[in-house]
Each structure stands twice: as structure tokens, then as C-alpha cells.
């Protein structure tokens, strides 16, 4: 592969899940090295992919890899959270499938200068799109110690968030924190040794995860896509999302479940109660699809992958209820 070595996770499962059709138009919102897109275009020789990535170097690699498909692959530098605007700009009203394979790619992790890796010395950057937004270092400088602590605790799921934040702020103040490995060492000092012995992962894993999610507004991006995708899918079109941690998977699971809900009241009563008459989407599989032992053995990154798929129905995209309270309470929200 063209200098972009990334093993696609759950590739067959994701493409099977999209059930691509002849002449279908698909969005790959996290194009990366185009592993999934290549598989889709190979499988259905009349399909088209609109590939979006916020990382210019990923797009460059994907462009080379997808060149043989000609205009069946259209590439866009942008964020998948802007999918509605991107499709409007391309004059595309509806698509037949949307795929997200969240998180960072191996080349992003492997290149020290991107600042994602705690084991390679690099600047504290962590931006997937190095052309915009604050770096991790700028973010840590700008936030108060309290907000930084909350961020590391909530987005990194790190119980020592407060202590780590305090030490980060002290180190920044003393001009002693500029690189990834300095941050990793600092986190190592903040977490008690006994805790570290109990854990299988590097002590800095959670702090780096929290900072990366914040720098790239990853949960906001996902929440926006989850909000708008039903309006962009043609009836029967599918949305397949591979996530790598529970914060993302929870958002996907809840939104898909919400869209699959319809009132159990007889239609007349449901209409009177302002409840949704028919599901906006159907769940293609009840449970998340996970990688096989075989795939995990070849690619350990696949261990935490969760794939969820839903299919758009022909029903109107209306909220589960238009009445505050009643139906929402019954729906357990
Ligand atoms: C795990 S990789 C995708 C790998 C790809 N599926 C493959 O098989 O080669 C994730 C990619 O999504 C991109 N990305 C992450 N969040 C994004 C967002 N909100 N908008 C656009 N691209 C995003 C990253 O830059 C990265 O290149």
C-alpha cells in the first residue's frame, strides 16, 4: 500500500452490513487508507463512493489507491459531521449507505510528529486535520485545571483525571511539558504504582484518549451525524458504524434504538398521543458485531471494535414523540 499501512477492521462484516446494491451511492465518512471503500467498489462494480476524511495525508493515500476506480470514487477533504453540507455541495440528495470506521488510523498513530502516540516523542498536537483547530498543547494551556480534570476523567474515563490535570498545569507553568513522552511520563507519576500494576494498558492510554477526543471534537462529530443521517438515506439505505470505545458505541446504540422505536398503541391512539407510528430505521443486528478471534490475532486493534448497522425504512423521519413526557417516559428515555 502507498505509504499508508492500515489494516481495515471488520471489513467484510461492514460491507456485508451495508448490503451494497448496483448503482448505489455510498458515503465513507472516515475514508482513511480507503480499505473499506476499495472492498465496496470491488464488490459492486457499478457503485460509487463519496469518501470524506479530515486528514489531508489520508486523502492523498486514498486518492492513489482509488485511482483505478476513476469517477466512481469522489474524495472530499472535510469532516463527516458536515455530511449534509458536503452532499448538498455535490448535488446528492440521498445515498444508499453511510459507513464510519471511527478513531485514528495506524499511520496517524505511527508518525511521531502527529502527536497521537505516547511511546514516540513528538509535539503534543493530536489533530487529525493539522490545518485547523487547537492542538492538544493549546487545549491544555487554555483550559482551567478543573475543566482539564473533567475532560480527562469523562472523555478518557480516567479516575485520576483531577490529579493528572493539576500536574499538567504545574508542568506547563514551569515550561516542562511540550512532548508526548513528557506527558506520558507525567501521567505515569500521577497514577499510583499499585494501580498501574493492576492494569494491562499503559497508564497514559486513557489521558491520551481523552485529549484526542476533545481536540478532534469526536463525540460532537458523531452526534451530528447520528442526528442527520436518516434524512440522507434512501429507503432501504443503511448506516454502519464501527466504534472503538464505549463513549462512541453508547451514542450509536442509543440513537439506533431510538430510531427503531415506534408506538405500540393502535394507530389512531398513537396519532392522538403524538407518538411515532412507524420506525424510522430497523436494526440490522440486535447486538454489536465484533471481530473474530482470527482477526484479533492478526490485528489487536480489532479487539475493541463494535459494528452496529441499521436500515432506513420508508417511514417519515419524525421524533419518537411530539409530546413532551408521556411517550418518552414509556420509551425509557
Ligand atoms: C480508522 S481510520 C479509517 C480507515 C479506513 N476505514 C480504511 O479501511 O482504511 C479513521 C479515519 O477517519 C478520519 N476521521 C476521523 N474522524 C473524522 C471526521 N470527523 N471527519 C472526517 N474524517 C475523520 C481519520 O482522519 C482517519 O483517517
Image (tube, rainbow, N blue to C red):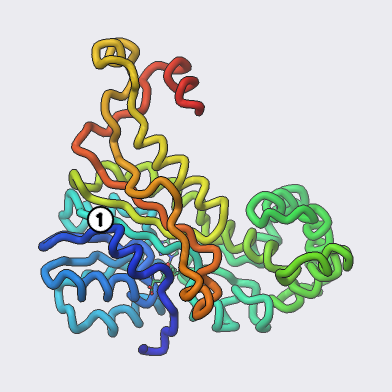
- Residue 269, by quadrant, is top left
Residue drawn at 17 percent across, 49 percent down: 93
The one nearer the camera, 100 or 257, is: 257
Residue 42 falls left or right of residue 175: left
Question: In this figure, which residue is indicated by the disc labeled 1?
Answer: 97
Residue drawn at 44 percent across, 79 percent down: 6
- Residue 141, by quadrant, is bottom right
- x%, y% of residue 36? 32, 71
Q: Against 115, is 47 above or below?
A: above
- x%, y% of residue 177? 76, 73
The one nearer the camera, 192 or 286, is: 286
Residue drawn at 19 percent across, 37 percent down: 314
Report ligand 1 position as a quadrant. bottom left
- x%, y% of residue 39? 27, 74
Residue drawn at 28 percent across, 83 percent down: 65
- x%, y% of residue 196? 82, 67
Q: Against 99, is 46 above or below?
A: below
Q: Secondary structure at mark 1?
A: strand
Where, quadrant-wise, is the N terminus in this rendering?
A: bottom left
Q: Is ligand 1 less than 8 Å from the beta carbon at label 1?
A: no
Q: Against 310, is 105 above or below?
A: below
Amino acid at each position: 500500500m502507498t505509504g499508508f499501512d492500515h489494516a481495515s477492521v471488520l471489513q467484510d462484516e461492514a460491507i456485508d452490513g451495508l448490503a451494497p446494491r448496483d448503482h448505489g451511492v455510498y458515503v465513507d465518512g472516515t475514508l482513511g487508507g480507503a480499505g473499506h471503500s476499495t472492498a465496496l467498489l470491488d464488490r459492486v462494480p457499478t457503485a460509487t463512493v463519496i469518501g470524506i476524511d479530515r486528514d489531508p495525508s489520508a486523502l492523498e493515500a486514498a486518492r492513489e489507491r482509488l485511482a483505478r476506480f476513476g469517477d466512481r470514487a469522489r474524495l472530499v477533504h472535510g469532516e463527516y459531521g458536515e455530511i449534509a453540507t458536503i452532499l448538498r455541495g455535490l448535488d446528492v440528495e440521498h445515498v444508499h449507505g453511510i459507513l464510519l470506521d471511527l478513531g485514528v488510523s495506524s499511520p496517524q498513530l505511527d508518525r511521531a510528529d502527529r502527536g497521537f502516540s505516547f511511546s514516540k516523542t513528538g509535539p503534543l498536537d493530536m489533530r487529525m486535520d493539522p490545518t485547523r483547530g487547537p492542538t492538544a498543547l493549546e487545549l491544555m494551556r487554555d483550559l482551567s485545571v478543573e475543566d482539564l480534570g473533567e475532560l480527562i476523567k469523562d472523555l478518557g474515563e480516567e479516575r485520576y483525571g483531577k490529579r493528572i490535570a493539576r500536574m499538567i498545569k504545574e508542568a506547563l507553568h514551569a515550561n516542562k511539558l511540550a512532548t508526548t513522552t513528557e506527558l506520558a511520563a507525567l501521567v505515569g507519576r500521577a497514577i499510583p504504582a499499585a494501580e498501574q500494576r493492576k492494569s494491562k494498558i499503559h497508564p497514559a492510554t486513557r489521558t491520551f484518549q481523552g485529549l484526542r477526543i476533545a481536540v478532534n471534537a469526536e463525540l460532537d462529530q458523531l452526534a451530528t451525524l447520528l442526528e442527520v443521517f436518516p434524512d440522507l438515506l434512501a429507503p432501504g439505505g443503511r448506516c454502519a458504524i464501527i466504534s472503538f470505545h464505549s463513549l462512541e458505541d453508547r451514542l450509536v446504540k442509543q440513537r439506533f434504538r431510538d430510531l427503531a422505536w415506534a408506538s405500540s398503541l393502535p394507530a389512531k391512539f398513537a396519532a392522538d398521543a403524538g407518538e411515532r407510528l412507524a420506525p424510522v430505521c430497523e436494526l440490522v443486528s440486535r447486538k454489536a458485531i465484533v471481530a473474530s478471534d482470527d482477526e484479533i490475532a492478526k490485528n489487536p486493534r480489532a479487539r475493541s471494535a463494535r459494528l452496529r448497522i441499521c436500515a432506513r425504512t420508508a417511514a417519515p423521519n419524525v421524533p419518537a414523540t411530539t409530546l413532551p413526557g408521556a411517550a418518552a417516559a414509556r420509551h425509557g428515555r
